[in-house]
Image (cartoon, rainbow, N blue to C red):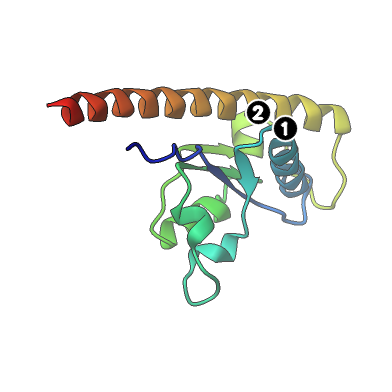
Amino acid sequence: MKSEEKPIKISIANCAGRSNTGQMSLEIAKKLDKALPYANINCLPAIFPKLKPMDKFTEADAIVVIDGCNEHCVLETIKLGGYKAAIHVSVDDTFGIEKTPGLDYDEKTLNETAEKVIVMVRELYEKLKEKKIQKTKTDNLNYDK
């Protein structure tokens, strides 16, 4: 008897710093969470077991990191927790957006940038899905022997 297929899960770890790019990172993560049912924002401290259970990151098939700037605080944090990013973007470096202090950002630039990240995560999902299909086929071949 086959066990039920586990759905693909992608965890999103993002910045929310006090700059235009930090706030864009947060908004991009929210747009991903809303647009893609398999991608969910997770609390960054959840990677540390003494603070909160790690289930969301541990159970994920992949982690997407959205840093606000080239200091890469989020990426470094997940590394400290023993995790790797399948996708890492930095709003300033990856998309050429100048970091400025404050909470304001250009809405049009945000939407264009978010759409690019959504495309990247959809492509990752398709790769994960294909990998899972190939593994299932291999497992079934081995089971039949």
Which element carries disc 1, helix, strand or loop? helix
Q: Around disc 2, counting alpha carbons within 10 Å, would you say few (fewer than 14), some (14 to 19), or many (20 or more)?
A: some
Q: Left or right: 46 with respect to 99?
A: left
Q: Residue at x 63, y 45 (%)?
A: 40
Q: Residue at x 38, y 24 (%)?
A: 133
Q: Residue 110's image quarter?
A: top right
Residue denoted by label 2: 118
Q: Residue at x 55, y 64 (%)?
A: 46
Which element carries disc 2, helix, strand or loop? helix
Residue 85: percent from left, percent from top? 46, 43
Q: Residue 117's image quarter?
A: top right
Q: Residue 118's image quarter?
A: top right
Residue 32: percent from left, percent from top? 69, 36
Q: Mark 1 and mark 2 in contact (Cβ < 8 Å)?
A: yes
Q: Around disc 1, counting alpha carbons within 10 Å, would you say few (fewer than 14), some (14 to 19), or many (20 or more)?
A: few
N-terminal label among 2 and 1: 1
Residue denoted by label 1: 35
Residue depth check, mark 2 versus mark 1: number of the one nearer the observer: 1
Residue in the foreground of this view, choosing between 114 and 59: 59
Amino acid identity at mark 2: Ile
Residue, far left? 145
Residue, far bottom? 50
Residue 122: percent from left, percent from top? 58, 25
Marker count (numbered): 2
